[in-house]
Image (cartoon, rainbow, N blue to C red):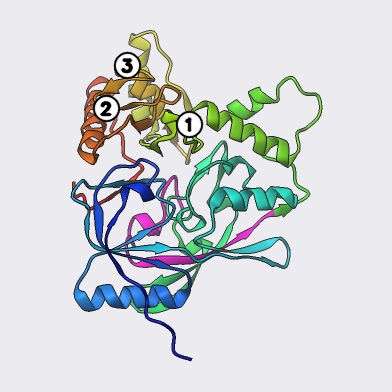
């Protein structure tokens, strides 16, 4: 039986497909519900010389005001399949938080601290999504992807993905080469939930008994909501792209210099364990100590009243507004502390 041709739409607004809600339209757009759709979309773009952008849940994206002149491919492949020994194959288009809920309800640990993160499963390996002491690379076994260059499916093992803090081959050296179709996770059965992060430890400090997986998930959701980091149409602080800046990872020498500058002002730099001989520094602390408070307003954009790292669309904002505030924050942090803040979101139709 001949498969129907992939439906390509034209001039589709992208702002409604993102959590930040800014930007123009895609010249061409399609949603892929299976592997064959992905293959057809790639062929369509290549035959016409179109730039291709893969869109997931739209939670970490800033779209240019003039839109995107190529083809936007939204991967909508769903399905959750249990494998032996608590391994699970998950379609790239599955909602991430619903998958976390699925795992917690079955007693599978390893992703409970990643509750409430918006977006799709396929986006999690790209940035090695992490929060509250967990990263997805801790549970990923492999990624099934379509290799645009070689025109074939490829199973990439965890060690092939180049996972590091908020990065992988998918957003660095091999950016644009692979379209993620499915992710295989290996969870733990019967293991205790992770309580590595200070906010979680504080939340359960008064308890004598150890919390369950579901209690940790609930705690993470409440903590994230208190910071405007759970999508809620009634919370204007959640109209953002999440944390806009990565926590800088400094060498020992860089950290000493930063600490000395802070000490001159009677301040102490909060940091977290990172790679050997390096320190991961709080980007939120740098932002707040460079003149940008929670609730800072700059026209139609601002900083969340709950979280210093979230740039929010206060209503009617443009990508130009967002980028102007980003640039102002980066410049002030650089001037005040000698530290460069790198953006977390993906910029679509924008070149820097």
Residue assigned mark 2: 329
* Dot in front, 1 or 2: 1
Q: CA distance from mark 1 to mark 2?
A: 27 Å
* Dot in front, 1 or 3: 1
- Left or right, 314 with respect to 106, comes to left
Q: CA distance from mark 1 to mark 3?
A: 40 Å
Residue 254 screen position, x and y as percent: 34, 29
Residue assigned mark 1: 234
* Residue at 41% from the left image edge and 72% from the top image edge: 146
The mark nearer the N terminus, 1 or 2, is: 1
Asked if the residues shown at circle 1 and circle 2 are in contact, with their CB atoms under 8 angstroms apart, the answer is no
Crowdedness of circle 1 by 10 Å Cα count: few (<14), some, many (20+)? few
SS for callout 3: helix
SS for callout 2: helix
Q: Which residues are magenta?
A: 163-187
Magenta segment includes 296: no
Residue assigned mark 3: 261
Q: In the displayed orientation, state which residue is furthest to the right.
A: 209
């Amino acid at each position: 039986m001949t498969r129907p041709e992939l439906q390509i739409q034209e001039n589709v607004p992208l702002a409604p497909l993102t959590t930040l809600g800014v930007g123009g339209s895609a010249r061409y757009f399609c949603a892929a519900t299976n592997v064959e759709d992905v293959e057809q979309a790639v062929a369509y773009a290549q035959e016409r010389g179109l730039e291709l952008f893969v869109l997931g849940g739209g939670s970490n994206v800033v779209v240019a005001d003039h839109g995107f002149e190529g083809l936007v491919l939204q991967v909508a492949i769903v399905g959750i399949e249990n494998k032996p020994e608590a391994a699970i194959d998950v379609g790239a288009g599955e909602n991430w938080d619903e998958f976390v809920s699925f795992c917690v309800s079955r007693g599978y640990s390893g992703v409970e601290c990643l509750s409430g993160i918006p977006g799709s499963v396929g986006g999690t390996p790209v940035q090695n999504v992490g929060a509250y002491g967990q990263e997805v690379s801790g549970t990923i076994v492999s990624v099934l992807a379509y290799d645009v260059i070689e025109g074939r499916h490829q199973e990439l093992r965890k060690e092939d993905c180049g996972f590091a803090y908020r990065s992988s081959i998918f957003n660095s050296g091999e950016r644009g080469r692979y379209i993620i179709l499915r992710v295989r996770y290996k969870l733990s059965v019967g293991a205790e939930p992770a309580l590595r992060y200070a906010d979680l430890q504080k939340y359960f400090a008064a308890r004598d008994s150890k919390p369950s997986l579901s209690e940790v998930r609930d705690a993470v959701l409440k903590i994230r909501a208190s910071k405007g980091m759970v999508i809620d149409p009634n919370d204007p602080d959640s109209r953002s792209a999440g944390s806009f800046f990565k926590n800088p990872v400094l060498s020992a020498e860089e950290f000493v210099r930063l600490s000395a500058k802070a000490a001159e002002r009677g301040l102490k730099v909060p940091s977290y364990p990172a790679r050997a001989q390096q320190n991961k520094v709080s980007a939120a602390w740098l932002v707040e100590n460079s003149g940008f408070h929670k609730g800072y307003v700059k026209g139609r954009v601002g900083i969340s009243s709950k979280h210093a790292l979230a740039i929010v669309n206060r209503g009617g904002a443009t990508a130009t507004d967002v980028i102007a505030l980003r640039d102002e924050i980066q410049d002030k942090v650089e001037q005040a502390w000698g530290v460069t803040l790198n953006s977390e979101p993906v910029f679509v139709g924008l070149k820097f």
